[in-house]
Amino acid sequence: MSCEQYFGGCEGGASHSKLVIVDKNGKVLSQVVGEGTNQWLIGLDECINRIFTLLCQAKVEAGLSKDQPLQCLGLSLSGADSLENQQNISTEFLAKHPNASLSCYTCNDTLAPLVTATDGGGVVLIAGTGSNCLLSNPSGATHSCGGWGHIIGDYGGAGWIVLETLKTIYEDNDGFNRSPYDVTFLKKAMYEYFKLKDLYDILPYIYPADGKLNKEFLAKFCVTGIVKGAENNDKLSQHILTHAGEVLGKHVKALIPKMDVELFQNQNEGLKIICIGSVWKSWMYLKDGFLKGITPQTDEEKQLKCISLVKLKPGANASVGAAAWAAKCAGGSRVEINYSEMSEMFFTRHF
């Protein structure tokens, strides 16, 4: 069976990746899940190897031949930020696997969710292991804020939340900066999760000998420790999550000067913000901080009069958006998406 009437899409994060094969009607023929594909964490060669492995698995599950190329393949990957970097990934992938697809296009992992949720432009705000924010204007122009990784970015992502928590505990212990709330709950949770005997035992997790920080393991403490603390009314846990909401809101506010006026014109829905990542599951604790961070202050920012937060529905798949985006880039083909089945609004606020 020829694969040329089918399209592939991969949503690749730092922790895990998902790849689908769809037909022109957007019907998912197969879906496979694998390890993270951020090249800055695993290297370009391993990134390409993992994607190719997923693609081969997906072809088999779809009943297609592994040796026949797809019409096109869209890669929406964490860490694929610059145009040069994106082109390099696509070129290297096709050079190593020329029969995988007739064409390959790469974008950042922020774009696929937006294409999956809406065709009218808006903002994608990712808060998973890391964080990133992308503005896609109706004119086609895109701008980003954040996405600089755990050393100088990832504000509001789970890894950042955990590092902020550890800093709070350690600075309070040293008397360098006193925590605004009692650290007892989170300090106990930290000892249990990281299996510490004393405070020094945290150092191998933060400064691993091989130089490769296990961001996924670190980020999971956000759920087992900090979110659990918030649910148990621990004031410090709630305070940290509120602060995370604030810095996430600031990502969007920073992009207001670069937004096309068309994005402000829907008086009922306003600016659509597609919220992606596990941190958004804690919206009730992020909410107050998020509104503080995003609320317009300057005359220029006050163009923003309304926002609608949107999430993908349980059955939705941003990998489908990656496939649809690639088909559009390739020209001559189109993958249809039923947007009402893909996303739903969960919060609206007028300013």
Image (cartoon, rainbow, N blue to C red):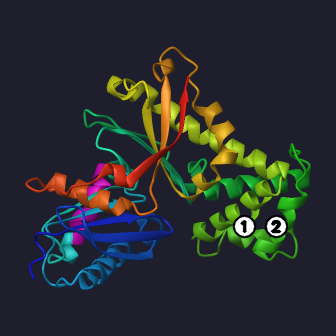
The residue to which callout 1 is attached is: 224
As rendered, which of 247 and 2 lies closer to the eye? 2
Quarter containing the C terminus:
top right
SS type, badge 1: helix
| CA–CA distance in space, label 1 to label 2 | 8 Å
Residue furthest to the front in view is 340
**Total marks drawn?**
2
Is residue 64 found left or right of 209 in the rendered image?
left
Which of the 4 image quadrants contains residue 246? top right
Q: What stretch is highlighted in magenta?
A: 83-93
Q: Identify whether 31 is placed above or below 267.
A: below
Question: Residue 95 lies in magenta, yes or no?
Answer: no
Which of the 4 image quadrants contains residue 48? bottom left
* Position in image of residue 66 (x %, y %): 19, 84
* Position in image of residue 73 (x %, y %): 22, 65
As rendered, which of 82 and 307 lies closer to the eye? 307
Image marks 1 and 2: residues in contact by CB distance under 8 Å: yes
Residue 66: mark: none
Give the residue type at disc 1. Answer: Thr
Which of the 4 image quadrants contains residue 34? bottom left
SS type, badge 2: helix
Q: Is the magenta stretch mostly helix, strand or loop?
A: helix
Is residue 282 found left or right of 71 in the rendered image?
right
Q: Identify whether 298 is placed above or below 150.
A: above
Q: Residue at x 31, y 70 (%)?
A: 20
Residue 189: mark: 2
The first of marks 1 and 2 along the sequence is: 2
Q: Residue at x 55, y 30 (%)?
A: 349
